[in-house]
Amino acid sequence: MKIIRKIKPEITAEKPKKRVAAYARVSRQTERLMHSVSAQVNYYSSLIQNNPEWEYAGVYADSGISGLSIAGRDEFSRMLADCDAGKIDLILCKSISRFARNTVDLLNTVRHLKEIGVEVRFEKENISSLSKDGEFMMTILASFAEEESRNISENTKWGLRKRMESGEIGAANKHILGYQYDEEQEMYVIIPEEAEIVRWMFRMYLDGTSLRLIAENMNNAGIRSVLGNEFCEGTVRGLIFNEIYAGDLLRQKSFTENHITKHKVLNRGELPQYLMTDCHEAIIDRETYEKVQDEMKRRESMLNPVYCFTGKIRCGICGQPYTRKKMMRGEKIYVHWICRSKKEKGMTCTSVNFRETELINICTDVIGEDFESLLREMKVTESGDIQFRLTGGEVRTWTHPPKPVRIPKPKPKEKRPSHIFDGKIFCGICRRRFGRMKAYNKQIIWKCRAKATSQATCNSVNYYDEEIRTVFCKVMDIDKFDEELFSETTEKIIIRKDGTVDFCMKDGTVRTYETLKLCINQHESTSTDEFTDKIQCTCCGNSYHRYCCYGKYFYWHCSGKKRITAECRNVDFSDCNLRQITAYIMETDEFDGSAFLKEISYISVNSDGSLEYHFIDGRIKKWQKT
């Protein structure tokens, strides 16, 4: 009979200690709250270190930062990074509101920590993130914390507006060019030296100086902004448009759109504004200030004319505003409103366009004859429907009629006639075949197919059909191109990078036509001093001079073209092409200026576009334009 005996372990396995950290946060840096943070740090440090089952992993504390967002909370982010690195097993926190006041951020963070095995305990609520009902309770309590934050935000905004109504609120910008805010007098006080700068700026604007030039004049005079930066066009415009220089203050120019993101937006009529007049000494008299505002409106109306739909139509697909586009077909002018994305480079949008006359009729049908005063905003949906938002808040919708289905007529496929060079010409750079197409002069031109592929590029030269026929006649020493002879003798044609043509014959031999053919459409920004007084025209005897085009491309042309006593129509050459031809003639890979001056006496340009290089030793080499 079997006997089973239990053997007890002699050494009891030690339970590993938990690595415990704590997190503390206060939203304002007051003396009382900073004392609270210090007390929390001491409390948690002592609590963790006195527990024999815990290992101290640190206390993370943020001060003066709101809990509505994780952004900006450096200690919080550092704590999460340490959790990801496996340095923390448990996080202690006083309450959910100290951890986060945003429900989404709280749940996302706690769920992430739960996935990597990190527990979060909230002492006040007595909740653990690893418990069964922990997430449910956290969602409810975090929602309360978020709502409490929203109430605090709304109460703060209400108090600010009440202070604005009574004129009690102080200045946000203590120092603005020309003024310094005095806390005792509770008003702006003029700084005489800066006030003269402000008056000079206003005088320049009334004299017709542009905003950009005003900024340049002030920068050149060594004047800087209150932050020590140089002035730009936008800075000058903001100062000239500021009512503070007339002795007034306009409150609530912007407002916080959302208490969570705290993103500030311009107040365009969503909330009331409060104008306090004659609340401090003016630098600019009111008459001058009004003249400047009228001048600004006049300039803006000339640059950006305002129409009945300007700034009121927005695309529901990409969010861009609609812009006015005028086009002419024949003698008729058509005006359309289209999404701005369709005019911006690199952007696309599939939104519906509308004729201006069509939009006016739609607005009249939906809103009425006086739609301009009632209309606040229009939104064009993807289907072409228009949502109208009126000034009173009412929303109306216009449904776009369905587009008629157009059945395209089948086009008969016309087979392109075959050509003697089809499948015979290959690129010496990328080894792809050459394809044929009709050039602007209706002649057949052959070019590498890589140039027509979006994912491939090739800088090979192109050849006209007649040029290839002429070159074949030269290498075969015949007077006229013979298609039958070409088909019987030639296997393929290879065009090298410099334009040299290799005819691979069917008997295994290769007949080569060496030449330098230039890429007409390729330009490089080069300027070569060595060509000065070295290029002579054989037609009129004048020398070639250099000129610049588009501010960066240099060309050489006969000076006789600009003289009354001489008429010359000889060809021009780009500087980059002359360098390429010269390197070809001198048998070097690249142009060498010092070698050119030592070996070449001068270059003569013939009427047929060919170049003759006269060497100092008496040799003459000719380059013939292919």
Image: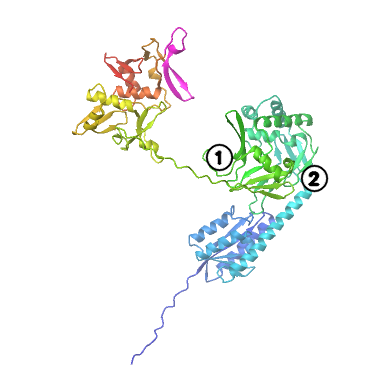
Vertical arrangement, residue 102 with respect to residue 331, above or below = below
Q: Is residue 448 left or right of residue 269?
A: left
Most foreground residue, 111 or 619:
619
Q: Is residue 132 left or right of residue 568?
A: right
Local secondary structure at mark 1:
helix
Residue 543 is drawn in which quadrant? top left
Q: What numbered label is drawn on residue 235?
A: none
Residue 210: x and y, percent?
65, 27
Q: What numbered label is drawn on residue 342?
A: 1
The residue that label 2 is drawn on is 167
Q: Is residue 512 visible?
A: yes
Q: Which residues are magenta?
A: 545-568
Q: Quadrant of the C terminus?
A: top left
Local secondary structure at mark 2:
loop
Most foreground residue, 176 or 265:
265
Residue 489: x and y, percent?
21, 31
Residue type at numbered disc 2: Gly
The magenta stretch spans residue 562:
yes
Residue 587: x and y, percent?
28, 24
Residue type at numbered disc 1: Lys
Q: Is residue 172 visible?
A: no
Residue 78 is drawn in which quadrant? bottom right
The magenta stretch spans residue 122:
no
